[in-house]
Image (cartoon, rainbow, N blue to C red):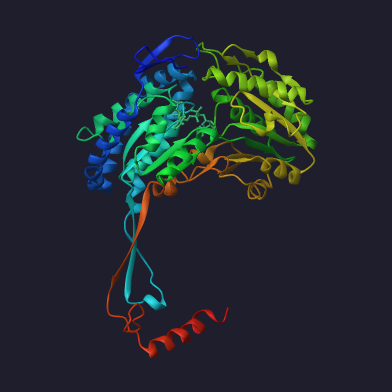
Amino acid sequence: MTTTTAADSTFDVISPATGRVVGVHPLGSTRDVDDAVARARDAADWWASLGFDERAHRLDAWRGIIARRATELADLVHMEMGKPRADAMLEIAMALEHLAWAAKNAGKVLRRRTVRSSALTLNQSASVEYLPLGVVGVIGPWNYPIFTPLGSLSFALAAGNTVVYKPSEYTPGVGVWLVEAFTQAVPEHPVLQVVTGDGSTGAALCRSGVNKIGFTGSTSTGKKVMAVCAETLTPVLMECGGKDALIVNSDADLDSAADAAVWGGLSNAGQTCLGVERVYVHESIFDQFLDRIVAHASRIRAGSDIDAHIGPITMPSQVDVVRRHINDAIDKGGRVVLGGPDAVEGQFVQPTILVDVPENSVAVTEETFGPTLIVSRVRNMDEAVERANSSRYGLGLSVFSRRHGEDIARRIRTGAVSVNSYVLYAAVPGLPLGGVDDSGFGRVHGPDGLKEFTFPRAMTRQRFPSVLPLTTFRRTRWVDSLVRFLITLLHGRN
Ligand code: NDP
């Protein structure tokens, strides 16, 4: 929770677990944002001029600092947003894999490469290279305050951009920590800066004239960001919400599927964009599967002590959303098999599993962002695919089936699918991550994630005068008839 002081110039960070103030940060104004963007603009040429190898060297140094001080960073994440320290460490491990990949591969993906010319342009040597956009603004969420922003920061920086970062008001300390660590690796110029604040600070960043906004957050905020960016035609990367499903076929390894459903649904207290919120299970194994997940999930406990498996709900307002979804599911005929309305205890929500929930319940249609699973029986995989695809979101999905996993996966309309595992596409550094529909557009990670923060510059160099001069008023009738002939020769037989 954020409260502003009398001067309205700072805000407090309140631990969701204890209610205590765990940090005080400047509430960044429009002027603070504009000043940071101006400094980033001044530093942009220097950073771009370092080239891929030197930038990789600096990004590797940053990675080393984060790795050596990882315990400190995990403690900070735990303190600000409440997840267990071990989960924060897992997040750091995954984020560093992507940082390493971006540094190592930026040159390979973005460097100038030649492109074949065509019959009409044989005299041209063609090439394309991917150039940095300039200054990128990154707006991040609190649920994975390292992994998600680094998905944009690492790739934007490796591509040669300078960056101004606005972390969530719930995890500003983590943002400041990351930028301080970067400054140790790159002390010369303000290549990566942080401006702490709330939504108004984020909105100021959208208006600041940056060359692109990399946004990760909810779909509703994403729409506001787009609307503001539209005024200046500022391009946007939208990594938004999800309502991911997990499909279990009759030939699935039920233990693995149950383990994935419980981890996918409950870890991080369900506050995961790629979290499992819906489970569609073949009717022939439904009861066995349900027994397994209920047994497993009933051993998971939310709390703030060292033995708790999951932490609190970070945003106070989200507790009401989770409660509303559970109540709506029950009101519409859903049955509680674990947890339920009583599972909501202050800022903590204990694991909750519901069955027989109609598809029109908000618990099925909207992002819940709590440790809840809606488990539904399906007659066959056609029905599972249809129901999984009926969401307005399209971020990720998991399929469990020994023989038909990939066939089912190919019928799914989401940015990523994992077969017989959960979420591992987000851990493979060469793969793009992002969604379709209400989950957003554009990609972080992999070659697509690097290209996201560049613009392609095409170039042709004339190697010798063309025997077929086309783009001149000196073109002859003979050339015109040859063009007519070539059109038929090259395309007329199709
Ligand atoms: P929000 O949309 O509330 O906030 C995201 C960021 O936007 C925060 O830094 C927030 O600042 C800022 N912001 C708020 N209002 C504005 C505005 N008008 N203009 C510009 N910036 C603004 O999301 P949460 O932080 O609550 O994150 C959870 C959401 O993020 C979930 O929907 C989740 O699914 C999604 N997400 C998506 C991921 C993906 O890869 N697709 C990954 C992780 C999360 P402040 O916090 O200070 O208000």
Question: What residue is drawn where x is 67% and y is 47%?
Answer: 408
Q: Residue furthest bottom?
A: 478
Q: Position of residue 430 (x, y in %)?
A: 45, 46
Question: Where's residue 215, x and y in %?
Answer: 45, 37
Is 17 rendered above or below residue 371?
above
Residue 45 image-quadrant placement: top left
User: Which residue is at the front of the view, 259 or 368?
Assistant: 368
Looking at the rendering, which quadrant does residue 439 occupy? top right
Tell me residue 164's x, y (percent).
33, 34
Which residue is found at the position 27% from the left and 78% from the top? 464
Residue pictured at 46% horizontal, 14% vertical: 15
Viewer-closest of 74 and 218: 218
Lateral position of residue 349 relative to residue 46, left or right: right
Q: Quadrant of the C terminus?
A: bottom right
Q: Residue furthest front?
A: 231
Q: Is residue 430 visible?
A: yes
Check the image and report above or below for 217 versus 19: below
Q: Residue furthest left?
A: 188
